[in-house]
Image: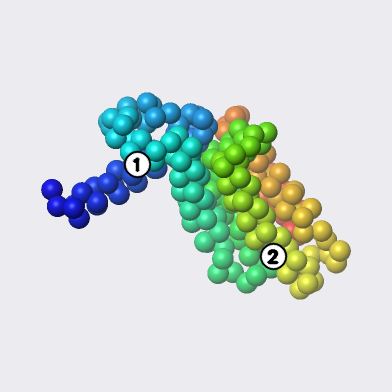
Amino acid sequence: MSPRKSAVEARQTRERIIERSVDLASLEGLEGLTIGRLATDLQLSKSGLLGHFGTKEALQLAALRRASVIFNREVWHPARAEQPGIRRLRAACASWISYLECGVFPGGCLFVSATFEYDGRTGPVRDLLRRQFGAWRRLLAADVRTAVGNGDLTPGTDPEQVVFELNGVMMSLNHALQLHGDTGAVPRARRAVGRLLGPT
């Protein structure tokens, strides 16, 4: 086997591991990413799987980074071309609701479940989650500030409060869909966002 072919196959195997890790983590949590389970699912040896990541923690971090790419593709990218401010906020919230409704991850939003799993812990996984959530909050808050400056939201509106409430709506929607199978929560989420951001 040529070195080039070997490197390509190694990348492909790594991609398979990460893809399965994201799906499994959304269903069973990041702690559910056991080397034995993944090796069985992917028909790999444990040592072969560990050779790609070294540790379970490295695998968890790779899964979170891939989940972030998926979230950005599904939620931010459809909205980013919109005019900054209220239009982009509304577009981002619409795609955020769609992402949760469509079940992009088989077990619901990986970030919601990971937050509950790691909010009381310390270490690199929690640190990465904090950075990922922080980056998303800053994007939303910037558009809230622009919307206030443009007169589309009431003067004195607190961007952090709006972002806090938007996150609450989406976490509640994920909970309603995943735990209760309550599809009626989708229009309720849209109405909640409408109250926060005003009618279109």
Task: Name the residue that disc number 1 marks.
Answer: 52
Q: Nearer the viewer, mark 2 or mark 1?
A: 1
Q: Position of residue 185 (x, y in %)?
A: 65, 40
Q: Please give left or right for residue 40 compared with residue 23 in the image.
A: left
Q: Residue at x 55, y 49 (%)?
A: 98
Q: Are marks 2 and 1 in contact (CB under 8 Å)?
A: no
Q: Could you tell me how far apart the alpha carbons at marks 2 and 1 are, in whole angstroms?
A: 39 Å
Residue 35: x %, y % from top left:
39, 30
Residue 4 is situated, as x and y percent measured from the top left of the image, at 20, 55
Instruction: List the single residue furthest toward the right.
Output: 156
| Residue 174 in view | no
Q: Secondary structure at mark 2?
A: helix
Quarter of the picture holding the C terminus? bottom right
Q: Residue at x 58, y 47 (%)?
A: 128
Apparent side of residue 185 relative to residue 12 in the rendered image (left or right): right
Q: Residue at x 51, y 34 (%)?
A: 30
- Snapshot colouring: rainbow
Mark 2: which amino acid? Asp
Read off the residue under disc 2: 143
**Please, which residue is most extreme toward the left here?**
1
Q: What amino acid is labelled 1 in the image? A: His
